[in-house]
Image: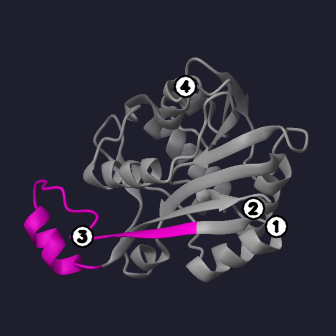
Amino acid sequence: MQSQTRLTLEAYERWAPTYAPDPHNPLMRAEQSAMLSLWPEVSGRRALDLACGSGRYVKLLADGGAADITALDFSWAMLKRVEGCRRVQASMTSLPFAPSVFDVVVSGLAVGHASSIQLWMREVARVLDRGGVLLYSDFHPEAARAGLPRSFKDEHGERIVVPHHSYEVDIQKAAAAAASLQVEHVRELRVGMEINEPFAGSETFYRQWHGLPLVLVVRARKP
């Protein structure tokens, strides 16, 4: 049986040709809005977009005046679509960087692809400089528990479910603390509340899942 990491990589390789470089659905637009509400000062800073996908946060880092931007992803098909920064193909739980080389680490909707949240947090803390900020989002464990899959349609219209781990919020907080990161903000984006943009079939969806948290956004700092 193929490992979950391999299956996830294969899914993203298939998704890459049609993966939009901007938030392309109501969930992603709500997620990005929440991330921007907690956005750290990036002007003149060294920044890492961790699990960058097609580079939507690279663009925002550049727009904010980041002095040096690195984009890292394990999928070369995704990574080759990113422009205007240093590109690194690697695992996000084994970062090929020296300690304390970044002032900001951002990661959008990717933590669930880490095989270990504890290792992920330790690696982020290792590459962050003192005073550095980690800002990340992910699919909320409550959504996974409710049976809502993470999926997409490939260029041929076939629906693909992307494997991912579901880490409870308290476990994520504990992993951050164990890595000596101080959690500053935790936000949960809920159906029909923070996520409320109309779409085809949204009335039924919002009525069925009203109040269910779909996205988690966390900001932490390295003292």
| Nearer the camera: disc 4 or disc 2 | 4
Image position, residue 109 (x, y; %): 50, 54
Marks 1 and 2: CB-CB under 8 Å? yes
Residue 199 inside the magenta-drawn segment:
yes
User: For mark 1, what is the residue?
Assistant: 179
Residue identifier under label 4: 62
Q: Is residue 3 visible?
A: no
The one of 58 and 10 positioned closer to us in this rendering? 58
Between 205 and 222, which is closer to the camera in this rendering?
222
Q: Amino acid at mark 1?
A: Ala
- Residue wearing tag 2: 121
Quarter holding residue 68: top right
The answer for how far apart the CA atoms under marks 4 and 3 are is: 30 Å
**Residue at left 58%, top 46%?**
40
Q: Could you classify mark 3 by the number of other residues whose Cα lies within 10 Å: few (under 14), some (14-19), or many (20 or more)?
A: few
**Point 67% across, 24% down: residue:** 67
**Alpha-carbon distance for marks 4 and 2?**
24 Å
Start and end of the magenta stretch?
Answer: 185-211
